Image (tube, rainbow, N blue to C red):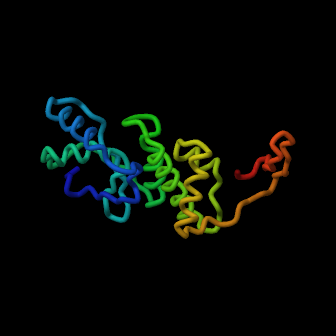
Amino acid sequence: VKMADIVLNPDLQAREKLSRENVEDYAEAYRTGAKMPALRLFHVADEYVLVDGFHRYNAMKRLGFEDTEATIEAGSLADAMLAAAASNSRHGLRRTKGDARRAAIIATNALLKLNPRKRPTVDKVAELAGVGRSTVEAAFADMTAAGVKLGAKDTRGRKATVNVESETTHETGTGEG
């Protein structure tokens, strides 16, 4: 794939920011002939959007690469967002808390694109983004504060319980948390 044909969409970047150190490490690896994983692209609306490999892409750009190996998948923007949200959950530079929250936001936005009338559940977003429930809850709070309409919580199957020791009320059950 020609590097010039790859589109960088900030809505698909699951990192809060690029690590200059990591980009330089990857550039050095490329200079010495190391075999790196191919970039992962989605073919969306006649564009090849990058969903995984932003540090590798920037290292190649720094070195003046004109083309690169890439895996290309066809799909919608929501499909690309879900792939981006899952990127780096099991490999690459360890995610920061901010990166994990960003992945949860991307997964939530993807689910909202797929079904704007259904509020994504904490468990589903956590599963898709590879993050914990508390990270998703924080992402939901950030999104709500930014004016994003998540929809009403589905509380079916929930029962309120009281923790006598701390005198706090919380919900249990099978619905969203």
Asked whether 68 or 58 is in front, the reply is 58
Q: How many marks?
A: 0
Residue shown at 55%/70% (left/top)? 147
Asked whether 169 or 59 is in front, the reply is 169
Which x, y percent locates residue 2? 20, 52
Which x, y percent locates residue 58? 23, 47
Residue shown at 31%/61% (left/top)? 47
Residue shown at 71%/52% (left/top)? 176
Image quadrant assignment for residue 12: bottom left
Q: Residue furthest front?
A: 166
Asked whether 173 or 38 is in front, the reply is 173
Say if 78 sits above or below 136 in the image.
below
Residue shown at 85%/46% (left/top)? 162
Locate residue 38 relative to residue 165 in the image: left or right: left
Locate residue 132 relative to residue 68 in the image: left or right: right
Which x, y percent locates residue 89? 47, 39
Say if 124 sits above or below 143 in the image.
above
Image quadrant assignment for residue 7: bottom left
Which x, y percent locates residue 52? 36, 46
Asked whether 172 or 154 is in front, the reply is 172
